[in-house]
Amino acid sequence: MGSLSDDFLPSDINNLSNLRYMKLPTDIISSICGIGKLKSLQELHIFDLRNEMGYRIDEFKNLSDLCKLGINCLENVKDAEEARNAQLCEKRRLTDLTLCWSETDSRNINLDENMLDNLQPPKCLRNLSIERYMGARSAIWMNNVNPIFNQEKIEFSNCREWETLPPFGQLPFLKTLTLIEMPKVKCLESKFNGNDKYHAFPSLEVLHISYLEALEDWFEAGVAAEDGCLFPCLTHLFLLDCPKLKELPSLPSKLKRLEIDGIGWTTLNFCSNSNPIPLAGEIRRPAALRYLSITNCPNLISGGRYQEVETSNNCHLMLSNLWISDPSVLLMEPLRSIASLKELSISLNDELVSFPNEAVEWFLNISSSLCKLNYIYLASLQSLPSSLESLSSLQELYIEDVPMLQELPNLPPSLKRLIIIGDCHPELKERYGEDGGSDRHKIAHISYIDIRPQ
């Protein structure tokens, strides 16, 4: 009995010379022998190469109308000259290109590098994705801004030997940059155009960096962009597991969402001064920032610097959502003097037993704005802040997997929803259960109560 792909497609499908689009699973599309005969094809989202006639990379040579192309299993290309046969640079309509290698242990690094040199896309390309490339350097064509001038979206992932990135900061139209699992990259930008005032990443809106274990700084040693000239249009910044990264650049006023997890921070340097001695009103804050997440940053907590840092009235944050793993960050500026907050989530902390007195008092700062409060995956927490009773705007309290919590503090009259689910202490269920709980009367004013222990 043949495979699904054998039975699904007629053997002469490659004779459909006017076919422009195919919406089929990858394994079905990759089963087409001689796909290069489909000369009118405009989109080929992913094709798995094989080292056999009819499935090699030279099949793409005559597909001149392609707008989107994804090539997988590039390890099956025998040499750099064969890669050149794809003639990607000649495809004048190509705007989206994905280049992928498979997860294999035995790879020739030099071959990967030379192959990528010969897979230069046309200048019209807008979106580039590269996955599991094992070369240590960028392709030659990447180091010259001209061939990649029009890039708007770039994603590199699982390129574990790559050391020096291309000059992304010089790309005038780049809006989204994603870098994942590139453990040898030490700085984000190292190439400069020689101008005295270097405006780096002038159009970048979204920056996502994950698992860059060696990343130490935004620029190579001894070079710095002018304050205010880095990421001027950035709205979303995601930093995950970059333990050597010690500080943020100056945050632009347009930033809306900032997520940090596993970063080597020692201070929350949200606000910046354009002069060493700031004048009144000169401190800038990310005025548009609404979502902030700071989790698993032990250097930030152990630094103990929150009492030393003061803030200007101009740096008070107004957040919609704040997500933290350690309440100690609430005592660091600018969070210490937060002006407004609608939803607070405290989660993923196995060591937190109770809240410091100062953190209990901190809740009074947001008593008139906080609407929702979440406690999630707190394995050792035994008590909630007593100041919850003073949260006059609180409408929902959500508790999930807080197994050591036996009692609730007095809750505010404004509360409309109480949800306790997952792993919870038997005593909590007994006290507040619907069937004769001894403290049920303390939450009787809440219109919606859902207590569902695991």
Image (cartoon, grey):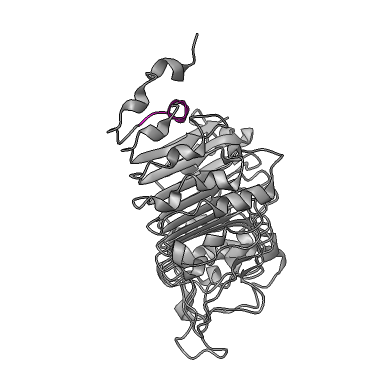
| On-image quarter of the C terminus | top right
User: What residue is at 67 percent from the left and 69 percent from the top?
Assistant: 266
Q: Nearer the viewer, residue 119 or 282?
A: 119
Quadrant of residue 427 within the rendered picture: top right
Residue 34 in sight in this render: yes
Q: Position of residue 68 (x, y in %)?
A: 38, 45
| Residue 408, percent from left and from top | 56, 46
Number of labels in the image equals 0
Kindly identify the residue that appears in the image at 63 percent across and 43 percent down: 405
Residue 69 coordinates in the image, percent (x, y): 42, 43
Indicate the position of residue 78 as horizontal and vertical percent values. Answer: 61, 40
Q: Residue furthest top?
A: 1
Q: Residue at x 67, y 55 (%)?
A: 183
In-front residue for pair 221/392: 221
Q: Nearer the viewer, residue 252 or 356?
A: 252
* Vertical comparison of 375 with 165: above or below: above
In the foreground, 354 or 319: 319
Residue 28, magenta (yes or no):
yes
In the rendered structure, the answer to whether residue 190 lies left or right of residue 64 reads right
Q: Residue furthest left?
A: 18
Q: Quadrant of residue 59?
A: top left
Is 192 one of the magenta-colored residues? no
Residue drawn at the location 54% of the way across and 52% of the way down: 118
In the image, is residue 17 above or below residue 237? above
Q: Tell me, yes or no, if residue 341 can be seen here.
A: no
- Picture layout, residue 182 above or below residue 281: above
Q: To which quarter of the image does residue 371 belong?
A: bottom left
* Magenta stretch, residue numbers: 23-31
325 displayed left or right of 84: right
